Amino acid sequence: MRAFTFLTSLLVALPLTLASNAAHWSAIASKSKDGIIKLNSESYEDLLALDRDYSVSVLLTALPPQFKCQPCHVFDPSFNLVAASWRKVPKQVRDQHFFAKLDFEDGQAVYQQLGLTSAPTLQFHPPLAGPLRNSNKLSVITYELNRHGLTAPPLHSWLTGLTPQPFSLYKPFNPIPFIVVPLALIVITVSLYSMRAILIPLAQSRVVWGTGSLILILTFTSGYMWNKIKGAPYVAAGPGGSVSWIAQGYSNQLGLESQVVGGVYGLLAFSIVALTVFVPAQSSPVKQRIGVYLWLAMLIVVFSLLMKLFRMKNGGYPFGLLF
């Protein structure tokens, strides 16, 4: 009879023990501003006891500067944001799942036990007892950082399908954009209005628009966009260890090659502008004649150089001028 009474008392006390265990971790989590339980090797084993009736998301990381773990520092705010979002759910649901963090400095024994050689690692531990226990989901689930990335939204989408209740991702209100943007617009508007006597003539200037148009035309005709899209190298290795700045063939191009071609196009354009604008503006016929000879010679020499460059790029091109 005494044995039966003892067994009955034990069965009654077991759920209370489990409940107090969850309450213990809930009290620790409530003291953290983001609801995350900071662990060491001993508390890690206690939190993940085999009789737990709650689930746990544990982040194994290495944040101290001596470990130089850049992904750990990038992923840490995302984990903190998701953990803080979980705190918004009702308390009776919140105490069924906990967020915890174990730094390598505080839990080297756990890292050795798990055989981990890299960080960060996020693991979901399902409940092993109580009403939330699912016999089909008793194994630890590891978050695939290489697949999902280090940002908060994919982590939230992954966890919300594992926690006892789906929850929304809470993003704290940031008032700075609502203050900075209107102030910036006001400052820009006032500055433009106060400088209208200078800006309006510039906006109506044919020289400004012509110069800007020439710069854009030279930029795009030199192959700049092709280099940006294709990711072309600036130079390439030539025969015998030399540096090659011009690529052979129609479908190849180098960054320095585009700059040289753009400079040649610029000299040709400036020669035409000089012949049509600067030379006629001279009042002396002698200066006009000298200007015509000078800029016409410049035009012929530079165009000959352009044809030589084209022949260097395409060896079968048969034409040339001076070179």
Image (cartoon, grey):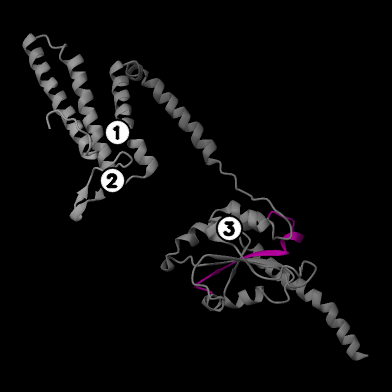
Residue 215 seen in render:
yes
Badge 3 or badge 1: first in the primary sequence = 3
Left or right of residue 110: residue 237: left
Which residue in the structure is indicated by mark 2?
Answer: 234
Residue 285 or residue 297, whichever sits in front: 297
Residue 207: image quadrant is: top left
- Image coordinates for residue 133, horizontal then vertical, percent: 76, 69
* Amino acid type at image mark 2: Tyr
Quadrant in the picture for the C terminus: top left
Q: CA distance from mark 2 to mark 1?
A: 14 Å
Q: Nearer the viewer, residue 31 or 184?
A: 184
- Which residue is outermost to the bottom? 2
Contact, CB < 8 Å: mark 3 with mark 2? Answer: no
Q: Whole-Å distance between the Cαs marked 3 and 1?
A: 49 Å
Q: Is residue 84 visible?
A: no
Q: Label 1 amino acid? A: Ser
Q: Quadrant of the N terminus?
A: bottom right
Element assignment for label 2: loop
Magenta range is 88-107
**Mark pair 3, 2: CA separation:** 42 Å
Please state which of the two labelled residues, at mark 3 or mark 1, is closer to the viewer: 1
Whether residue 69 appears in magenta in the rendering, the answer is: no
For the residue pair 238 and 106, the one nearer the viewer reads as 238
- Check disc 2: other Cα within 10 Å, few if <14, some if 14-19, many if 20+: some
Residue placed most toward the observer, 308 or 187: 308
- Label placed on residue 80: 3
Which circle's residue, 2 or 1, is located before the other in the chain? 1
Q: Residues within 10 Å of mark 3 (few under 14, many from 20)?
A: some
- Mark 3 or 2: in front is 2
Residue at image position (68%, 50%) is 168
Image disc number at residue 222:
1
